[in-house]
Amino acid sequence: MTNSGPLIPRNRGIHPVIHDPEMKTTMILGPMEPLLSMESTMTEETGPRFGHGIIGQLDNNLITNFTRGKSEAIGERIRVHGRVVDENNRAVPNTLVEIWQANAGGRYRHATDHYLAPLDLNFGGCGRTMTDQDGFYEFLTIKPGAYPWPNRDNEWRPMHIHFSIFGHSFGQRLITQMYFEGDPLIARCPIVGTIKDRAQANQLVAALDIKNSRPMDYLAYKFDIVLRGRRQTMFENRLEGL
Amino acid sequence: MAQSIVNLFETPSQTAGPYVQIGCTPNFAGINGVYPEDFGLRAIEDGAQGEIITIRGRVYDKFDEPMFDPMIESWQADAAGRFPGQPDADPKVNGFCRFPLDVKTAEYTLKTVKPGRTPSRSGGFHAPHIALWIVARGNNIGLNTRIYFEDEQEHNKVDPVLHRVKPVKRLDTLLARKVGEHEYHFDIRLRGEQETVFLDM
């Protein structure tokens, strides 16, 4: 069986809605016109490949990567790990996974974030890694804090880590957010709430993974990711050179 | 009962938010020293074959205000229409580029090679184009679109995607305007009168 068919059309029903009055910015910035549906082409079925060479030794350790190993970020130490597969349940090896997050106080290291919580001198908030041959990845970081944001009155984001995943083709590109099991703010969050399918929203909640936690060091959370897959067929093979 | 089909659902998207630069272009965001340089800085390396072009533009919201915090990524073929990784592809063409918007002008700049036409599944060709993926605050899922070129009329006329844009006047939103020798202009409008045609493939 080959992997050369088009991308399986994206099921928009399992994604967030484009407009949601509970998330006000979507009403100003989300497109109004229907998307133009088309079958994927070679443009979306190819994509950048990455050498493991671009990844530095500390890139997936957000506790120490900002100080280059000199000192450690403040916060609850966690390991986030999981597997990237496609809709056909095939591993997605050697693909770039990038993350970013607020510090333990809920503050981002960014010129436009003016939240009261202080910056942590030892925390930058970005990290990246490559999935291994079987699609597995891991990060060491600190648990990000919840923080307020302007939307409805008294709006708070649940603790979350942003994920950017490439896959093997440009059409698989995905940015999402990981939440933490047991956080009571998840159910109140209008951004999570843009996903109308409850089971799908639950896909974004990482499970506490005690058996992969390291005694006297860190708690582990498991977060698996599913990217789009391609129709697996012999019937759509192109002739060589076409 | 029939046999069951393995049916995993794609992980749902969430907005990239206003701080996507921290994760994707940390050096640009002022977080220096974690990575030597931001990933995806150059669509091409010196020595790429073909016409080297510069495309500039902005991302506008519903009120025609330029936005500063979206992130754009591009992916394209080389001058001969081959994608990086394919046999005989130009080794100096990375194909991928990731660019934030200028903090003062809100403008993006993509320096690249003008791509060749690429084969379609049905045996025809796609007109030269550059795929874009845009993530922005207020958008819960990345937006796909394409930059085509207004000076590629012959190819554009038979392009299977352009062909399907209705109403036809919206076609203009996918065409980069030639504004100088090897220079093009292409704006993205997330919403409103001149809303860009976004693709779902």
Image: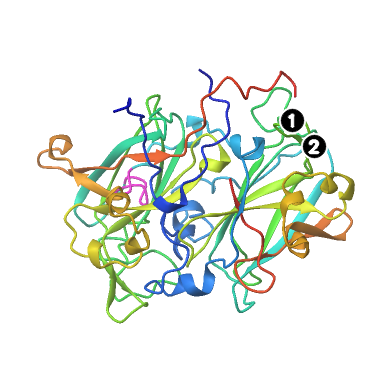
Question: What type is the residue that disc 2 sits on?
Answer: Ala
On the rendered structure, is A154 left or right of B37? Answer: left
Residue B42, by quadrant, is top right
Placement of A10 over or under B184, stated as above or below: above
In this view of the protein, can residue B47 be seen by the observer?
no
The spot of residue B98 in percent (x, y) is 59, 50
On the rendered structure, is A203 left or right of B20? Answer: left
Element type where label 1 sits in the image: loop
Residue B148 on the magenta segment: no
Q: Do the CB atoms of the residues marked 1 and 2 lie less than 8 Å apart?
A: yes
Locate the C terminus of chain B and report the quarter of the image it occupies.
Answer: top right
Location of mark 1 (residue): B90
Q: Chain of mark 2?
A: B
Which residue is at the far front?
B1
The spot of residue B151 in percent (x, y) is 88, 53
Q: Nearer the viewer, residue B97 or A196?
A: A196
Residue A200 numbered mark, or none: none
Highlighted magenta segment, given as a residue range: A61-69
The spot of residue A120 in percent (x, y) is 30, 62
The spot of residue B113 in percent (x, y) is 77, 43
Locate the N terminus of chain B and report the quarter of the image it occupies.
Answer: top left
Q: Majority secondary structure of the magenta segment?
A: loop
Residue B79 numbered mark, or none: 2
Question: Marks 1 and 2, how far apart in space?
Answer: 8 Å
